[in-house]
Amino acid sequence: MAARVEASIGGGTGEIDEEGGGDGRGTMWDLDQTLDQNMDEEAGQLRNMYKEKKFSAFLLLQLSFQSLGIVYGDLGTSPLYVFYNTFPRGIKDPEDIIGALSLIIYSLTLIPLLKYVFVVCKANDNGQGGTFALYSLLCRHAKVSTIPNQHRTDEELTTYSRTTFHEHSFAAKTKRWLEKGTSRKNSLLILVLLGTCMVIGDGILTPAISVLSAAGGLRVNLPHINNGVVVLVAVVILVSLFSVQHYGTDKVGWLFAPIVFLWFLFIASIGIFNIWKHDPSVLKAFSPVYIYRYFKRGGQDRWTSLGGIMLSITGIEALFADLSHFPVSAVQLAFTIIVFPCLLLAYSGQAAYLRKYPHHVEDAFYQSIPKNVYWPMFVIATAAATVASQATISATFSLIKQALAHGCFPRVKVVHTSRKFLGQIYVPDINWILMILCIAVTAGFKNQNQIGNAYGTAVVIVMLVTTLLMMLIMILVWRCHWVLVFLFTFLSLAVECTYFSAVLFKVNQGGWVPLVIAAAFLVVMYVWHYGTLKRYEFEMHSKVSMAWILGLGPSLGLVRVPGIGLVYTELASGVPHIFSHFITNLPATHSVVVFVCVKNLPVYTVPQEERFLVKRIGPKNFHMFRCVARYGYRDLHKKDDDFEKRLFESLFLFVRLESMMEGCSDSDDYSVCGSQQQQSRDGVGNGNEIRNVSTFDTFDSIESIIAPSGATKRTSNSITGSSQMSGVGDEVEFINRCRDAGVVHIMGNTVVRARREARFYKRIAIDYVYAFLRKICRENSAIFNVPQESLLNVGQIFYV
């Protein structure tokens, strides 16, 4: 098996950029972590592991059945409240029922069926759905991330799938236009955050309207019960629902699919019964001509009724966000065979009943149920409403986790509730916030009409955001012809903007609620992201020159005490400012120093075997290394013991591979490096600055073999200065001894402040909002489960 060693030579002065390119004077060894680069066949096999698997027909049917409980609970419970929210003032003309039913039929056909199930679901990121999954796809195909920490080694991950296009293509022109200005990147991020915040609003409104509508069925058979009792029952159900979230859907998930399947079976059967018994002529609503006649009769009420009709397609945002649990083909099959026909029958049955009893529109669902199956249906409806609430709550947790990985949400505790399914998580802080807001909405409004108005506003904005993101996905990822992109975007916006214009009339009737909730979450998320970006820029601009480090010599001008110091930084290259701050104020440092960068990538997961990249900083006798730990937005940080164990395994592997590469004397590159080593030493002797060369070029680790001419003449009474490494075994043993002496985690505690001359809104955002969020969020040490006795915080402050 042949190994490859590359030499990179350059000259000049100045600090390098994050890409790690540049013309720094010096010599570098490119040491590949894999001994044989000709591994195309094996790499292809690895990539295929993360493609959607082929399923047998029986397994596909089984997965389709299971998807009913997780994916379609929210969409399936819409018949509980659609007709009442469509006609909140009563039905004046029986023909309006046919027009409303026709609108419902074609809304279900155009939006959930054609757009989401067969188009948007195909835009998943390796099975992951939601607005941040779409954003991750865009970040991989264009440099639109606002935090510029991308590197070309990230593109070689087996899960980092992307497509390329011709330089003069429409996709390439769109890519350059997006990358051209910072304002465009920020606008795209705000669009993604807006969609995410609206889905969070759905996580509050869905349990409220679903459970309240289900509990409202008590008034049909128990008419003496007032609305206060119904609200109290709904609140008790909601508190119980949120209180069991910490068990995870894995514990009770086996119940979800049978409950929702029974729900669909019952509503379809009741729909068929009502059509047969009351008015079979409602089936003429399948003709779109009745939509035209509905609006031709005029009146603002018919236009604003679109806000209620739109509730028939609620749940599509949770459908896309919960996509990670099942293959796309299973989701498509379940909707086509079960969900879509059952919903059409349910709405048609209610319409047939209302044609005969239009005054029962307030409780249309329960009034249309035959008396002998009322109570079994009430129980199933309540259970189905709970399952529907669970779907949106789980979607909210998933989106919060994705936002955390993109640096767009304060650090909160994330609990993995299932050993089998990576996507099943629980976020305690968000869970209790959702519960409080959900109870406030339920108890505050007390009726489903106002909650329905709020719900409709949130759903239509999410649909608009998804359409705009899909336009970019079709151009950059799918490379569709611009005509197809235009047709998809035009048709989607034509339908969704029509609904949006209708919900605008209901902003003062409850529609303001999701706007306020979304605005609050948007401020929190954007301010946190802004502070994170400024902290990263501060670290980038204040990183220490490698010339300064090398000039200190192997002892770094200090006493090197036994032990290993893990210095956490956000930089994947360069020596962070906190390290210079640390060694400037303390007279000693550890015998081995490892700079640890925990980096989140725009991929859904990073395989364990590709998690760590390790390299050496400076000559061997400095005993300084860098480790970049890479995570996807679905990955959970393991406990500290496991993290440390894997880190040191990667470090030992690097040392062994490095020693093997030094023995490859038959390499042409080896001799080139040797000749350039003397040149660079001469350059150092003349006072030229050695630039920081800590970068990755492929799946590599880089060893700098340059040292100042005076560095080898220095002596030190420290462990490192007196130790002469004779081979790889000696260095591994040395690192093990240092590890046994103790591992200290050194973290920066950076305080961000606004400058005095900054504008007032920036001072409010940084000095108050961001400072408050930093105060209440989890510390980095808690994220990595660092023991307090092994933690050392280095404080620093900077102004923006």
Image: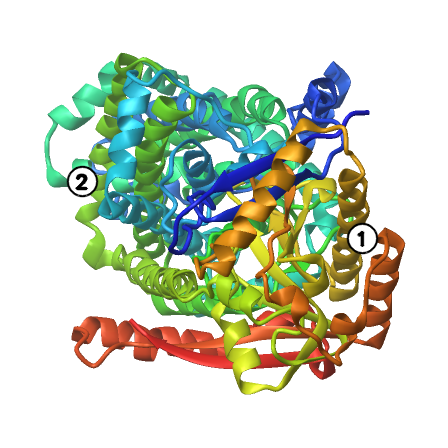
Mark 1 is surrounded, within 10 Å at the Cα level, by few (under 14), some (14 to 19) or many (20 or more) other residues, namely many
> Front-most of 283 and 567?
567
Q: Secondary structure at mark 2?
A: helix
Give the image location of residue 747, x and y in percent.
58, 73
Residue at mark 2 to residue at mark 1: CA–CA distance: 62 Å
Q: Mark 2 highlights which residue?
A: 501
Q: Mark 1 highlights which residue?
A: 652
Asked if residue 659 can be seen in this view, the reply is yes
Examine the rendered structure and indicate whether residue 797 appears above or below residue 125.
below
Q: Amino acid at mark 1?
A: Phe
Residue at (24%, 32%) from the top-left corner?
177
Contact? badges 2 and 1 (CB < 8 Å): no
Q: Amino acid at mark 2?
A: Ser
Residue at (78%, 25%) from the top-left corner?
2
Examine the rendered structure and indicate whether residue 56 appears above or below residue 247.
above
Viewport quadrant of the N terminus: top right
Q: Earlier in the sequence, mark 2 or mark 1?
A: 2
Residue at (53%, 33%) from the top-left corner?
125
Residue at (31%, 43%) from the top-left corner?
188
Task: Name the side, left or right, on which 444 lies relative to 510.
Answer: right
Task: Classify residue 596 by image quadrant.
Answer: bottom right
Using the image, tell me which numbered label, if any, was put on residue 629. none
Mark 2 is surrounded, within 10 Å at the Cα level, by few (under 14), some (14 to 19) or many (20 or more) other residues, namely some
Asked if residue 365 can be seen in this view, the reply is no
Examine the rendered structure and indicate whether residue 764 appears above or below residue 370.
below
Give the image location of residue 656, x and y in percent.
82, 47
Give the image location of residue 46, x and y in percent.
71, 27
Give the image location of residue 96, x and y in percent.
24, 30
> Front-most of 382 and 711?
711
